[in-house]
Amino acid sequence: MLPPYPESLRRKLARNLLRNALRLGRGESLLIETWSATLPWASSLELEARLLGARPMLSVTDEAGYWRALDEAPESQLGRIGGHQWAALKASDAYVDFYGPMDVVREERQPPAVLRRARSNDHELMRVLQKYGIRSLRWDLGRTSEVWARRYGVDLRTWRRELIEATTVDPRTMKRAGVRIADRLRRGREARISHANGTDLVLRLVGRRPWVDDGMIDEEDVRTGHILQVVPSGVTSVTVSETDGEGTLLSNSTGVVFTPERETPLGPGRWTFRRGALVRFEAPSGGPALRREMRRLGTERLPPGLLSVGLNPKISTIPLLFDQERGTINVEVGRNSHLGGKSRTPYVQAYLALRGGSLEIDGELVVQRGRLVAP
């Protein structure tokens, strides 16, 4: 279970999400979905929405009931959502998901077929959100656990504290920095990453549109279909040329390997690129998982996929959000077609992060030794 948190903190976070992230207006409809573990946070969000003059609706999934259903209900009934639930979502102007379940160990023990069935509506959910332009946020406090904290080598209390503090950062401050960096990434032709630890990697930029995840969903985000953000947020990213890349990246932070089955911590480690491909890597933690995936795919090379810069000043240890720590430089290899790139490698992605590094775009510093460079 989650520890109790003061109402003043819950309501502060709720106000930032509603006013600054979702920019919820009077008379707008808000759908809130929560699991039992995060119900106090969802209740505070509901109250603040009413104080704004909005019209909230709260839906709760009881975790104990969810596990009973997985154990006892026919597999054909898992993951089914009725038309009444879809109707509520389609009629909403905004949506907040307090994600779950919390028992991640029990979840990982489920047969893959059962998990796929239980999550079978995820694609339809995204389709509905985009089709109807529903401004949406997801918050993962309900996914924190001692098991995952040990797996990622972080302190659980610190992880939870940062999830809260980083979600109360005013997104407008991150947007200014994010837009400036995005402009440089869009106009630039060459990105060079360096560090005193020996990192020296050159990637080619090809004029693709960068994404700015600043924790605020504005009119442009809705217009371009970028309507779901995981909070806390804070990263500017762009897909890079899949056929260019020379040099070495020595990570000094934990990254991740994403495969269809699970997420595995990766790094710190060393990646070597030659002629536009990752040709050698060393990472005691997570490296074997990446090698297994590469063998499964029958390849010894993965193309560069993504370059990003973190923007959030309150993130330093959050698993899976390591790329959003302010001033952190991140490189991804593998599939990037779902992010606007051209690599359709069967699903495998791996990220490494670099703290304290420098990033130059066409010879001009954007990040200098871990600090964002002012324009």
Image (cartoon, grey):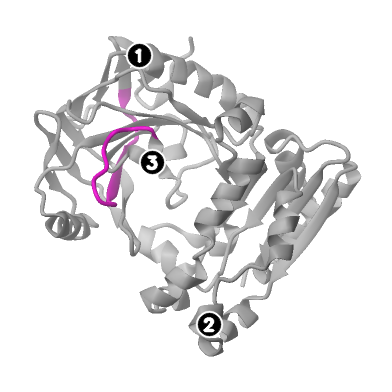
- Mark 3 burial class by Cα count in 10 Å: few <14, some 14-19, many 20+: few
Specify whether residue 347 is painted magenta: yes
Compared with 124, 61 (above or below) is below
Residue at point 58%, 25% (across, down): 175
- Mark 2 burial class by Cα count in 10 Å: few <14, some 14-19, many 20+: some
Query: In this view of the protein, which residue sits in the foreground, 16 or 346?
Result: 346
Q: Which residue is mark 2?
A: 70
Q: Is residue 47 left or right of residue 317?
A: right
Q: Is residue 345 left or right of residue 216?
A: left
Q: Which residue is mark 3?
A: 338
Is mark 3 in CB contact (under 8 Å) with mark 2? no
Is mark 3 in CB contact (under 8 Å) with mark 1? no
Type of the residue with mark 1: Leu
Residue at point 83%, 41% (across, down): 28
Q: Which residue is mark 1?
A: 365
Q: Quadrant of residue 78?
A: bottom right
Image location (x, y in percent) of residue 66: 60, 78
Image location (x, y in percent) of residue 311: 50, 31
Disc 3 from disc 1: Cα separation: 29 Å
- Mark 1 burial class by Cα count in 10 Å: few <14, some 14-19, many 20+: some
Type of the residue with mark 3: His
SS for callout 3: helix
Q: Quadrant of residue 271?
A: top left
The answer to whether any part of residue 231 appears in the image is: no
Which of the marked residues, 2 or 1, is nearer the chain's N terminus? 2
Q: Nearer the viewer, mark 3 or mark 1?
A: 3
Q: Magenta residues?
A: 340-358
Residue at point 64%, 36% (across, down): 169
Disc 2 from disc 1: Cα separation: 52 Å
Specify whether residue 357 is painted magenta: yes
Q: In terms of secondary structure, what is the magenta stretch mainly?
A: loop
